[in-house]
Image: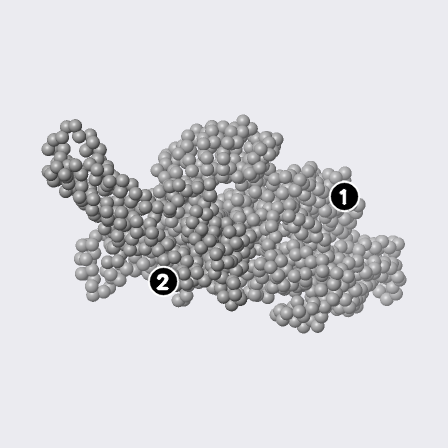
Amino acid sequence: MSEKKILEERSLILNRRSFLGKTALGVGGVALASLLGNSFFRKSPKGLLTADEGPAGVKGILDSLHHPAKIKRVIYLFQSGGPSQLELFDYKPLLNQRRGEDLPESIRNGQRLTGMTSGQDKFPLVGSQFGFQQHGKNGTWISDLLPYTAKMADDICIIKSMYTEAINHDPAVTFFQTGSQQPGRPSIGSWLSYGLGSENENLPAFTVLLSRGSGRPNGQPLYTRLWGNGFLHSLHQGVQFRAAKDPVLYLNDPKGMTKEGKRAMLDQIAALNDRHFQESGDPEIQSRIAQYEMAYRMQTSVPEVINTDNEPDYIYKMYGADAKIPGTYAANCLLARRLAEQDVRFIQLYHMGWDQHDNLPGAIAKQAKDVDQASAALVADLKQRGMLEDTLVIWGGEFGRTNYSQGVLTDTNYGRDHHPRSFSIWMAGGGIKPGIVYGQTDDFGYNITQNPVHVHDFQATLLHQLGIDHEKLVYKYQGRRFRLTDVDGHVVKDILT
Amino acid sequence: MIAQTLQIGNLHPLVIHLPIGILIIGFVLEIGFRKKPSDAVRDILLMVLGFGALTAIISLGTGWLLADNGGYDETLLFRHRWLAVAFTVLTAGLYFLKRSATAIAKKLYMPLYIVVLILIGITGHYGGSMTHGEDFLFADKTTQKVVIEDVDKALVYNDIIQPIFDNKCVSCHNTSKIKGGLLMDTKENLLAGGDSGSILDSVAPDKPSLFLHHLQLPLEDEDHMPPKGKVQPTADELALLEWWMAHGHCFDCVVGTMEKTEQLQKILKNLEEDTSTRAMIAKEVSVVPNAWLADLNSSNISASRLAIKSPLILINLYGRTDLTPGDFKALKKYAKNIVELNLGHTNFNDTLAPSLKAFKNLTKLQLQKTAIAEKSIDVITEFEHLESLNLYGTEVDNKAFEKLENLPKLTHLYLWQTNITKEAMDAFANAHPEVNVQGQIDSDIFKATKLEPPTIIADTDFFKDSLQIAMEYVFNDAQIFYTLDGSIPDSTSLPYSKPLTIHRSTEVKAVTHAPGWNLSEVTASSFKKISFDVNAITLNKNPNERYKGHGAQTLIDQKRGTVNFVDGNWIGFEGSNFTATIQLGKEEQVSSVSVGAFSSPEKWIFYPTGFKVWTSMNGTDFKLAKTLNVGPEEINTNTKFRFFDMDIAPTSAKYVRVQVNSQLKNPEWHPNPGGNSWLFVDEIVLN
């Protein structure tokens, strides 16, 4: 049941209640109603949804897209913790030449620092310990840490000029996901579920997959509000698929419950809920009925989609042997492809452990190994299935890392603090120019010198590719119209085909 | 009222054709019945002429109103208007002449009719010139209209400015008129200027160029250009001209690289014309009613508009395995509006193929993982707009594939897992460089990926008599190889087939191997046989309060610490060595001592640098039995743990004392050199 319908029906039911209900006009109202006929009140709210009812492709609040869409779905490979752009994509030989020298104040230019390095009296520059080579037709510089990604260089668009305002993880991730540093707004996937609805009535429009990185296995955790629905109705929240016996919690029937019994129970609960809804008109009740039904259908659809037994060996060769181990990033990438095949609109992966304040060289090598092959394989796999044309794959974290060492710089070891002023992400697929590098940073890899892309620009572009004008997908809440891009955001036309 | 006036005026182009047609048919009738005049014919002609005159008056009236809207070339308008007045008057005269019975009227009638017909021709020509442009009839059609697809890539002069000149200036400033000695048809002539000199560059430093000067004068001014009465540039065109002049009337600039205001950006954007296949189709088809879409969606066919207000429709039938010809019939009514059809993973097959024929305007067709073959391809070859075709996982073979050769618009073709050979794909790709032919991803990219090591499974790490050890790996077809002697296993080591049993302390090392994959890294597990009972253990100093496990007992509880060093099975010492003294249950022959330790430099935890072992019979006199120096750790950041095994000359003993040496301070290579380093130990095993 789409939210629009729910709201429509709510207003209808409230109209009728105030019209016929406990007012002095009651009797006259009834007379008038019979004069005007039923059509005046239109049909009564649709009753219960059963498993085989309802339109294919439950659509969202938007009747049609604002402009033709380039893509049908998004796979967002979120690299949580802030991957170092200087070790992965932004090649800065100057930092190796001037290793150990203090960061010039003219470059830092008053940048706010985190509490972790603000006490440091020296900011020794440090270049990447890992080599860079040129790859692909355009000679894109990519780190030796990402050999597989490098081989897909002609298919990805690297943006080296991302920037954000947040300097700590929670606000920065929240900013990327919801367009605001403060918690409480809906996540990107929730906005899409709200705006576009689900193409597959058996699976949620917004699914979430988590994995822990080996670079910093005990790094910061994530929290469910990052894929929360904020002030939107709860049916728009992301559904987390876990790497466990119960991939989606509370989906399985308790022991001893039959399928028929479950159906009968749901029907009864729905009848009760519906009655309550008739009385109160609270749309969250309809939301809840829809969720029960979705859960019921997911009892069969989820095991089907996560059962990778029939994936052939050559697919595992692409994604790497890790893909056999549930809960790894590689396994999640494979799962993401399977969900994408089922027309799930927004598939969000989170890979934790990129927060390398110290021991960066060792940790980032492991972390890169976690994600490199599977990310590249995902792009390649989508490509050979003809899906890269209408799927957008995004790889990136919440901010970058400093060009100077956090802690003492030694011959073989260093760390990097959070850096919001410039960092790199890549995108591949639907409507994004393949094989290009967009934006530039200065030789210190500290400031952007060309084509800056703000978080809101990124979000506006993402929505644009889906056929949505980011200024028009709004939700009125507490007297204000909210949108994903808040009050800003420009579509980055230069990277679009 | 104004609105109504405007609308009536707009009827002029419509009603103008009435008197023309009526008067021509009158003339034809007049000629046709010349030889057999009758009263009936006269009456008919009177009616024709009368109605002709009436419509001529209406045309004149509407034309007058339309002219008031302005925007027309005044010379042309003047001629058209007064010729039309003459035409109307003469047509009315014609009617009265026909009615009159006088001889002079009869004589004048036919010549006047011919004059009227000539007037129709001339007046009509001026009218046509006003709406379609003066050179409409005799124009040099070699100059093509400039079509801008992406305004950022447009040449500002060539694609934007010169077309404005062509429309608004060149009618006077051309080679046949050369008003003011100025030609505005080419870059060279513009630069050459006119009788008053250069027009684009300012003559005096603080004065605008002649071009801007004349352009910006008020309309009433005599020197205003284009002169009053000529078609004026629109506000947008003025803005564009001024913008171009502000950029030094650049002749080679590309729009994308020029500075512009947001307002101008919008004007520029409006110049773009969408020439994509879909835009062309959209112009040809009618709008689809919402009700039709709603019907489809309620009958399990996902249908949506390409975008708001677009007449184009996308249909998604993905995954449906119950498709019948009826489903396609439901789409037939607006089949021409459907530009995208997803039939992937459906029961669509060659039998259903004829149902596809109606979808002539498809630009994207997805047939992946369906049972289609040649017959469907035959239908597809008719789709002249098709741009993207997905045939992945179908039975299509080389023969059918060749038929796709003639799809004119094709750009994307997906052919993975079909019966089409690599050679055929390559040949196609070479012959059609504009088509992106996607077969299997180059297998070299993911060649020989590494396997993960197997898992070694046992109930316990310490055992008395024997222990069963199993190994497993997620890939069923991968083979596990292992060693029991501490050597590095490879694919020539012992192959694992069923659980094995060990009877003495053993370090099991194993790898995974599968054809086509790289050997995995080595995994290792130590299993310790414990021969004697231990009575008690004492430590010379207490472990750190935070990492004390359950005291000294932790070292002999036969519970091995895991990779998680805070699991309570490890005890930790900060920046110091320690010594443990173990009391055996009875006198035993001791020949080896093993100490388990943990290392994770990131966490400031390092392996011991050395050990000392003493034995004693009475617990007071200890005899040194072994000194082992391991040395400090090399640079690394790995988290790991292992046993340090020390063989000693077999000695009878009731007490054994072990000193474990820490490196005390973090080494130079550590991010925090000189900090207190930690020692984490679990289990001391004697044999």
Count of marks, rendered view: 2
Please, which colouring scheme is shown?
Answer: one colour
Question: Tag 1's secondary structure?
Answer: loop
Q: Position of residue A334 (x, y in %)?
A: 57, 46
Three-letter amino acid code at the position of disc 1: Pro
Q: Which residue is mark 1?
A: B489
Say which of marks 2 and 1 sits in front.
2
Q: Residue at x 69, y 71 (%)?
A: A120
Q: Which mark is residue B603?
A: none
For the view shown, which residue lies furthest in the top direction?
Answer: B399
Identity, as a three-letter code, of the amino acid under mark 2: Glu
Q: Secondary structure at mark 2?
A: loop
Q: Mark 2 = which residue?
A: B220
Instruction: Report x, y in % for residue A440.
Output: 62, 58
- Chain assignment, label 2: B
The residue sitting at 54% across, 49% down in the picture is: A432
Tell me where residue B88 appears, x and y as whole percent: 22, 46
Which residue occupies 65% across, 54% down?
A: A89
Residue A3 screen position, x and y as percent: 39, 55
